[in-house]
Amino acid sequence: MTVGREVHLASRPAGRAGADNFAVVEVPVPEPGPGQLLVRNVVMSVDPYMRGRMNDVKSYVPPFRVGAVLDGGAVGEVVATGAGTRRQRGELVLHGLGWREYAVVDDASARPVDPELAPPSAYLGALGMPGLTAYAGLVDVAGLKPGETVFVSGAAGAVGSLAGQIAKLRGAARVVGSAGSAAKVQRLYELGFDAAFDYHDGPVRESLAAAAPDGIDVYFDNVGADHLEAALSALRVHGRVAMCGAIAQYDTDEPPAAPRNLASAIGKRLTLRGFLVSDHDHLRDEFVAEVGGWLRGGELRYDETVVDGLENAPAAFLGLLRGDNLGKMLVRL
Amino acid sequence: MTVGREVHLASRPAGRAGADNFAVVEVPVPEPGPGQLLVRNVVMSVDPYMRGRMNDVKSYVPPFRVGAVLDGGAVGEVVATGAGTRRQRGELVLHGLGWREYAVVDDASARPVDPELAPPSAYLGALGMPGLTAYAGLVDVAGLKPGETVFVSGAAGAVGSLAGQIAKLRGAARVVGSAGSAAKVQRLYELGFDAAFDYHDGPVRESLAAAAPDGIDVYFDNVGADHLEAALSALRVHGRVAMCGAIAQYDTDEPPAAPRNLASAIGKRLTLRGFLVSDHDHLRDEFVAEVGGWLRGGELRYDETVVDGLENAPAAFLGLLRGDNLGKMLVRL
């Protein structure tokens, strides 16, 4: 009997998540039934939204269960198939059963991955959920128009670095990014951001005002808290906020800081809109065509921070919450 | 030389506004020039937004100037005309130069008032700016759909009481209102609200959860602060907030309370949109036809709280900020 490893939620965090909230467990690898694939994962994603699923709260996805395996995006190789599957042994597929070495995946829900088009990891990043998130947030949610000024927080992360570049490629006149280190800020300039700042260097409101002295039209929010407050202050009349994430408040049980200037949205006629990528699947073909083209042409670049080994997946995830990553945080199995 | 009285801003408030921030001043009544009307005001409006104009802050309307006359909506009778005016002596007009007994109004900007259709005061309320605000907030901003549940705060006020009734008339399945006294709550039931509560009776979040146990789809916000936080908690997936006002924080220099659960807008895909009625003038004909019809048919009712005498206009305004009014607060001159 083949044995594989998987990562379980050992306990729910009280405040900050830590290594003791996870357990690596050996389990037998089952046989795939009819319409199922046995997949050996080769790369898996850790994402900020997973922190919310560690808490026992009702949300748009059910919480992880204590004592059970976690899940999330992964790409793997089909190593065995049940009866009647479309996918064949040896093919790569994208699916939602990460955090484990072997997964039994429904053939119907497995998406094909073409390694000739892009490396498998890109299907978890620029060509995958983070890429579509950035694209949908700018196009569908914020309604970005050419000539506008855009501010992206968490701009060195998987979604943020794509959002800033896509904004430029779709005609934004000026794109400003915030990040958590001098090295990340330098990388944002290399990626074509017009201005960037380290949010540790002073109040976000002042840094943003210096970077966008004439204000902003669109704020792509990955951070929340003081970043959102600063953006509300900088937004011009009829400005829009695409509320994508609030990583500043994920890994804490402190009462979240709130934008004290939210009422300024009235006089400035601002629109704040929360969104999930799952509502924007109708954009997928357009996204793959446009973003895929930019990737092949070298106009859009992405960074990856790769950690090796399933046993290091919890550390990769905790590092992501601390901002250790540049671009997409991945675990190679 | 005829003498008239007008109300000046004597000083800017430090914290709460008080009677000493106003001064009633006698001034000579000028002659109307070419294209101008001399208007004797018969009724004037006091509105919450005027509190913001008493502060020296940049906003969508310039601040009032210390030592100068205030302004705002009023209806008056034309008592003299300059050369070449459309309006004639004896006609009633709606204009923006309230807070004074006599106003010299540009003929081009004066709107005709037909007292056969509705009493002059209605042009400052249900058929005027508050009515169009309620209508635009529901129709344009919140995109109210039949069958939805709507929560209106400040629901016994000029805008709120219309918003709640218009929501019902446009097919809302359930309309909940909050107000500041038991008498106001009773009045909301008389006006057809399905549920209403006094926000003094307990945490707004709990009162709202009891009044709308299945949640809400639309929140028409006149209050901000804890009302907005409670509404964010009650809003269902794809809910919308029409941000119309934030009276809870107008008359104070305390840092405004902020909704600590704003990030819940992400998972619930909420839209919060601030608006000013001035952006929605394209709705005016539709508004006058639809709301005018409901008024004539007795399906839509409105309340007025009337104070007599220009010298009492500051007290009327301060009372409005305290919530002394039921429906539209007006000063009869």
Image (cartoon, coloured by chain):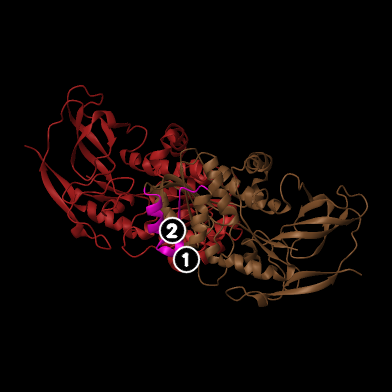
Chain colours: A red, B brown
Q: Amino acid at mark 2?
A: Glu
Left or right of residue A5: residue A226: right
* Residue found at x 29% / y 57%: A319
Left or right of residue B139: residue B124: right
**Number of other residues with Cα within 10 Å of mark 1, as a class: few under 14, some 14 to 19, many 20 or more:** some
User: Is residue A167 placed above or below B22 in the rendered structure?
Assistant: above
Q: Amino acid at mark 1?
A: Ala
The residue labelled by disc 2 is B229
Q: CA distance from mark 1 to mark 2?
A: 9 Å
Residue A332 is marked as: none
* Residue found at x 40% / y 62%: B203
| Residue B31 can be seen in this image | yes
Name the secondary structure under disc 1: loop
Name the secondary structure under disc 2: helix
* Residue found at x 64% / y 44%: B295
x%, y% of residue A11? 19, 56
- Nearer-N-terminus badge (1/2): 2
Left or right of residue B18: residue A14: left
Task: In this rendered view, identify the residue nearer to me: B211 or A259.
Answer: B211
The residue labelled by disc 1 is B257
Left or right of residue B213: residue B20: right
